[in-house]
Amino acid sequence: MNAVEIEEAVSNLASQPFDREAFPFSFLEAYGNKETTIKRLQSGNSNKSTIAGGVLQRSNIHLATCDEGQVTATLQQLSDAPETTKQKAKFILATDGEEIQAEDLTSGDTLACAFADLDQHFTFFFELAGISTVKEIRESAFDIKATSRLNKLYLELLRHNPDWATAERRTEMNHFMARLIFCFFAEDTNILRGDNLFTGTVEKISDPDGSNVHEIIAECFRSMDTHFTEKDKADIRVWARSFPYVNGELFSGSRECPRFSRIARTYLLHVGKLDWQQINPDIFGSMIQAVADEDERSSLGMHYTSVPNILKVLNPLFLDELHEQLEAAGDNSRKLANLRRRIARIRVFDPACGSGNFLVIAYKQLREIEYEINQRRGEADRKSEIPLTNFRGIELKHFSAEIARLALIIAEYQCDVLYLGVKAALDVFLPLDNQNWITCGNALRLNWLTVCPPSGEKVEVSGTDLFGADAGAAEVRFENDGGETFICGNPPYLGFTWQTKEQKSDLESIFKKYTKTWKSLDYVAGWIMKAAEYGTHTKTVAAFVTTNSICQGQQVPMLWPLIFGTGHEIAFAHTSFKWANLASHNAGVTVIIVGISSESSARKFILSEERNGNTSKKETNYINAYLVPGTKVIVSTMSKPTGDKSVMEWGNKPTDGGNLFLDENEKTELLKASPEALKFVKRFMGAQEFIKGLQRYCIWIKDEDRREAESIARLKKRIDDVAKMRLASKAASTRKSAVFPHRFRQIQSVAKGYSLVVARVSSEGRDYLPIGLESKHVIIGDRNFALYDAPLWNLAIIASRLHWVWIGTVCVRMRTDFSYSNTLGWNTFPLPPLTTKNKADLTRCAEDILLARERHFPATIADLYAPDKMPEDLKRAHDRNDEVLERIYIGRRFKNDTERLEKLFELYTEMTAKGT
């Protein structure tokens, strides 16, 4: 379940009569527990509670209902119960139907409220649904509740007005919703100069069956588009004349409204009765964006971006420097005035702005700095000099673009209230400025210089006027010319496999003039290239959130020489971290932040998240395309391993149509019918067999044994079927292999004693790459690599954190998984010369890792290396291995992955320079 669905379910639960027996299960159901889970708890099979009326769900919650007035005592009983600790409950909750008390056992936060008010605190228990409970999400309860109500209204209107659900009228529908949102906010903040003016008017004037609601709303809109001096002349209805003139073209053009049912009218009134003063434009725009997007509605909350994550982009881009200048200025009036003048001229441009999150946060942060300057200068009442038109955006979806502008308008008003007071804010808010500074269009097709032009040049927006009827280009001048431009955002990532034809065409339009090898680039690469092109015309710094794949593997030599060729360098970067959102059970996609600039600066730096949660900063003279300091290099494949490392080969490739494989039952049947076939049956190890411990077998026949094998009828049939399959292939090489249908098409090698097995594709969620030791009797498949009869210290190298970061950086990614390569990952891995003692120490480390695994038999690689579930003895073995290996490199442990990569690239540069 997503956040909006949870809010709705909890609201329904809180509004129903209290059922003491049913409540625990209804509560768990509201937070996404499946019916089968509920039934197991109800039957007692998985309920570990020993308290009367108690339900304990392992790793989640221990809750109990109780007699009236016994809530506090019951909560203490839940806290003291041994099973609460033993079953690792995260929450305890007690209720008597009148009161609810709860505690978050992880953070120590507590909750006490009336039972009927449970829906006001639904975010407290978000972790039960797998949703992060960071402070920003906890405080977003209103935005989620408002989104839930708006979503109900939106769907009911579409149901009652199917013609408005068509593509032709979807823009009208979205524009109608934007107008409603403004009205709800404006009436609760007194912008409409009347208590509950909009909702109250609809409630009083419209018919209960909703039949004339559309007419009432349309007249309200007409009044807000009519200057107060013209309302009599326009014959505005008496009951609508008190609405102020809004302008801004928000209510101009067509004012046709969808028709309302009784249910839709009820939903409208419910939405209007929320306290819209609590709206948070930081998150609200993203939530509302999903309401109007059919493809995204099923995952409401997916687009939430936390303020701390946005600041990871904006702080190094320009805010940190402004704060440093503010600190240096102290109380110097002249320096403060100069800084204020600089801030008023800064342009922030997001060419993938969505619903405006980055622009809103940037605006609010600049207003905060400006206010601090005004206070220090004794001018706290001074009006802001930061114009909204300096915050430019491009957004593909019409409704998102409208919401982005609306979010900025709301943010401006809220900042005015915060820094100047309500009266001053109201005095300047209406009428709205009718200029449009958010462009609706395809950012990869538009000329960014026309949307956010260089300083001193004419400003024209290449897009339609979002709030007006005129489809022509709208000219929007910068009020404060001569400032810097900072580009930022979180564009769509989309690897090539998931791009539409139109998106592939977008990339072609950008890259075809530079290179023919662009087709494997992620979609986000288009924004980086456009930013680099923009930076050749005007001084700017651009920073984007992107998947780390553009700085790994094959995309590095495709993209970054082109970026560097425009004169840009990487000015700063933030290495991999999780970009989380409000979606249930969503740990967040792994991303990086890359900042590029055409201005060479000595203040280049790399930010990295430490394992303890802190962020480290490393300054450097140069950042390469892999986001590693100090070394300008692009890693190329090598045909042979460097140093003492053993040869790593592909596993054996069958190309057999499945005819040379047996499952457990087929193996049993074959041997029951023909026991002599045992010599031709081997255990087979593909990736799933290696990582998940699955059992699979293959038919393995040497050339000299073919005649004997074909004397067994069941084997003869399978051999013949392989021949037929290969002869029917379109590939010439496969057809040629039909002459030896008794064996795999490609046999790399077979171990004499044992094999070291490395999975070709593995999850980045594991702290170490999967590598194992297998007997000579196991046939290694081509979904793995193998080191046959290699010294065991090779396993210690591959199982190290050092090797993990190297593979994750230089090899190709499949989605977010590691895609191992022998020629690009293993052969190139820089390894210092190893002494006999080094090899002996590493061999012991490898043995310790294998012995630790063995102690947990039959646990598989997937079991042992699951995130946060690695056994302690195995952790210790890996930690010891890392320490031994890293001391060989630098005499101590590395501080973080950035330092590891810095050393590896230094050694790689030395290694390739020597030709070793």
Image (cartoon, rainbow, N blue to C red):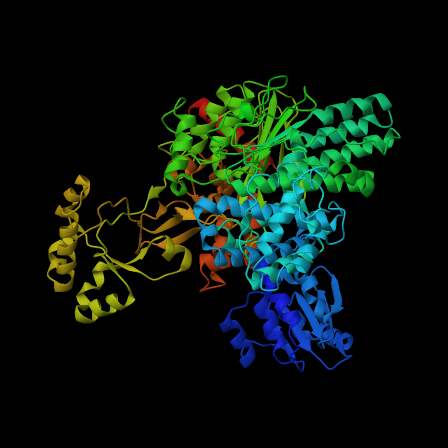
Residue 692 in the image: x percent, y percent?
41, 59
Along the viewing direction, whichever of 794 and 309 lies nearer the viewer: 309
Can you tell which quarter of the image residue 210 is in? bottom right
Along the viewing direction, whichever of 114 and 83 lies nearer the viewer: 114
Residue 112 in the image: x percent, y percent?
76, 67
Can you tell which quarter of the image residue 44 is in? bottom right
Q: Is residue 689 visible?
A: yes
Give the residue drawn at x 62%, y 68%: 12
Image quadrant where one finds the C terminus: top left
Give the residue drawn at x 69%, y 55%: 201
- Above or below, comparing residue 147 to residue 760 in the picture: below
Residue 242 in the image: x percent, y percent?
73, 47
Q: Is residue 780 left or right of residue 878?
A: left
Along the viewing direction, whichever of 353 and 488 lies nearer the viewer: 353
Q: How many marks?
A: 0
Give the residue drawn at x 54%, y 23%: 450
Image quadrant where one finds the N terminus: bottom right
- Above or below, comparing residue 37 to residue 886 in the picture: below
Q: Is residue 284 visible?
A: no
- Above or below, comparing residue 74 to residue 832 in the picture: below
Can you tell which quarter of the image residue 636 is in? top left
- Above or below, comparing residue 676 to residue 315 in the picture: below
Residue 341 in the image: x percent, y percent?
76, 23
Q: Is residue 222 left or right of residue 589?
A: right
Along the viewing direction, whichever of 700 and 122 lies nearer the viewer: 122
Q: In the displayed image of the protein, which residue is found farthest to the right?
A: 378
